[in-house]
Amino acid sequence: MASLNLLTARNAVFGYGQKEVVRFSLDLKAGEWVSLLGPNGAGKSTILYGLVGLLPLKAGEVYLQGERLSKLSPKERAKRVALMRQMPGISYPFTAFEIVLQGRYPHGPSKADEEIAWQALQKVGATHLAERPFASLSGGERQKIWLARVIAQQTPLLLLDEPASHLDPAVSHEIYQLLKKLCAEGKAVLCVLHDLVYASLMSTRVILLKKGQFLAAGPPEEVLCPELLGKLFGVPFSLINHPINGKPLPFPSISL
């Protein structure tokens, strides 16, 4: 029997004020990693904000685990889908541990909350930051704390906006390994990425978004081709094969 979609969008329209920014349809099942790629301003983050209910649905339908998004209370939405935004430019008067603990809010006060939050910090390798004021953390450290907060929320669906930005290559690799493990455990991920290499390595499917519309969608080996990427970003691309697994990796064919 086919598994239930964790996310279903049908002709969904999101935007700001009277402006329509994105219009799309999408299905996402347990264990899938779908990457959203596109130039700045294409509507990638707008899709994520809309799918967690932070923007009003202007048209179409969105379902989370078969329930209409519009019919779910904020707490019920937050039990089904978690959003990791791009790192905000503001500081919060909390410790790192308190930020992670906030991910438990949808589940109500529980004796298990602190242990779950601590385990989330362990998963991202950030227990040593627990008592540090969040305002004192570096950009990369803050990114790890936001990811731990999302993990502590314990939702089946994760929406991630550049989850490894501000992180060095070694830590980025650790984060992507962790996220790959979460997918293997049955979580679904919809992830905004600018890193085309990790999009190729991580994705079940890739969606190319241009001016609020899907330019192409499918397996990375089909979608991450020079022709489509050239149309998307306006610069030429070439492919090289990964030295270990042979997957095609796209790079801009430009010189400085």
Image (cartoon, rainbow, N blue to C red):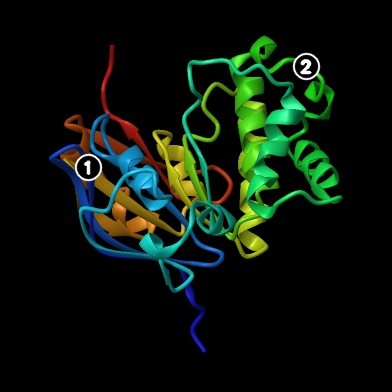
Q: Earlier in the sequence, mark 1 or mark 2?
A: 1
- Residue 248 in view (yes/no): yes
> How far across and how far down the image is residue 126, in percent?
77, 29
Q: Which residue is mark 1?
A: 15
Picture quadrant where residue 15 is located: top left
- Residue 178 in view (yes/no): no
Q: Which residue is mark 2?
A: 132
- Which residue is painted at 29% across and 48% down in the image? 56
- Which residue is painted at 51% across and 25% down in the image? 87
Q: Is residue 96 left or right of residue 12?
A: right
Type of the residue with mark 1: Gly
- Which residue is painted at 54% across and 21% down in the image? 166
Picture quadrant where residue 182 is located: bottom right
> How far across and how far down the image is residue 17, in percent?
18, 37
Residue in the foreground of this view, choosing between 140 and 112:
112
> How far across and how far down the image is residue 77, in percent?
50, 56
> How far across and how far down the image is residue 118, in percent?
82, 39
What distance separates the C-alpha of mark 1 from that of mark 2?
37 Å
Q: Local crowd at mark 1 within 10 Å, few (<14), some, or many (≥20)?
A: many
Residue in the foreground of this view, choosing between 217 and 98:
98
Q: Is residue 92 left or right of residue 60?
A: right
**Image label count:** 2
Type of the residue with mark 2: Arg
- Which residue is painted at 84% across and 23% down in the image? 128
Q: Local crowd at mark 2 within 10 Å, few (<14), some, or many (≥20)?
A: some
212 over 166 or under it: above or below: below
Q: Secondary structure at mark 1?
A: strand
| Labelled pair 1, 2 in contact (Cβ < 8 Å) | no
119 over 58 or under it: above or below: above
Q: Secondary structure at mark 2?
A: loop
Picture quadrant where residue 249 is located: top left
